[in-house]
Amino acid sequence: METEREQVSSTVERLVNEVGGWPHVTTGEHRFGGTEFRVGPREIGHVHAWGMLDVSYLRKLRDVLIDEGHTGAHHLLVESGWTTYHVESADDYDHARWLLRLSYLYHVAVLRKTPAGAEELPTSTSSRNSPSWTRARPSARRSNGGESTGAGSSAASTFRTPTL
């Protein structure tokens, strides 16, 4: 049986392997440790071996995700578009993947509006043509510290599409 630390480590490794396989995503060592994920010049996020996942969003989307309990404010850059989510067990994998996919789709869409991005990023990376899991909406919501947030935050609750 895996220890809690081993479970987090294997979940992080699984996340790195999957996200690193998305179209146009490159992985590399993050300057503060861990693995970062990039689409072109944009970092969509990074994850540390101990389970801290930092993800970049448009500030307005970041605010909605925090308000609805899907993630927390970045542990250091609280006024930025960055968020922090803690992977605490294998059960957090789908939600962590969803948070990264949301950032990925946003950054791909922005890059496609540039001449270089329109040429390099085919439309096959859009959510319309993505596997069904990319459109899946997580059911459990946790705050930055891993505790359930508010009424309806149980695993049985449903995700509402963020309203911007």
Image (cartoon, grey):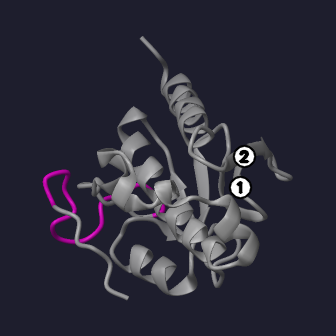
Q: Amino acid at mark 1?
A: Arg
Q: Amino acid at mark 2?
A: Thr
Residue drawn at x 42%, y 41% as measured from the top left: 93
Residue found farthest to the top: 1
Residue drawn at x 48%, y 54% as measured from the top left: 124
Q: Position of residue 9 (x, y in %)?
A: 58, 29
Front one among 5 and 61: 61
Q: CA distance from mark 1 to mark 2?
A: 5 Å
Residue drawn at x 56%, y 44% as measured from the top left: 22
- Looking at the image, residue 77 sits to the left or right of residue 73; the answer is right
Q: Position of residue 108 (x, y in %)?
A: 59, 66
Image vertical order of residue 155 relative to residue 127, above or below: above
Q: Is residue 147 magenta?
A: yes
Front one among 128 and 101: 128
Q: Position of residue 137 (x, y in %)?
A: 28, 57
Q: Residues within 10 Å of mark 1 (few under 14, many from 20)?
A: some
Lower position in the chain sequence, tag 1 or tag 2: 2
Q: Which residues are magenta?
A: 144-157
Q: Determine the main secondary structure of the stretch shown in magenta.
A: loop
- Looking at the image, residue 61 sits to the left or right of residue 26; the answer is left
Image vertical order of residue 59 relative to residue 8, above or below: below
Please name the residue that numbered disc 2 is placed on: 26
Q: Which mark is residue 38?
A: 1
Assign the N terminus to one quadrant of the image: top left
Image vertical order of residue 138 relative to residue 80, above or below: above
Assign the C terminus to one quadrant of the image: bottom left
Q: Is residue 35 visible?
A: no
Label 1 with label 2: CB-CB less than 8 Å? yes
Helix, strand or loop at disc 2?
strand
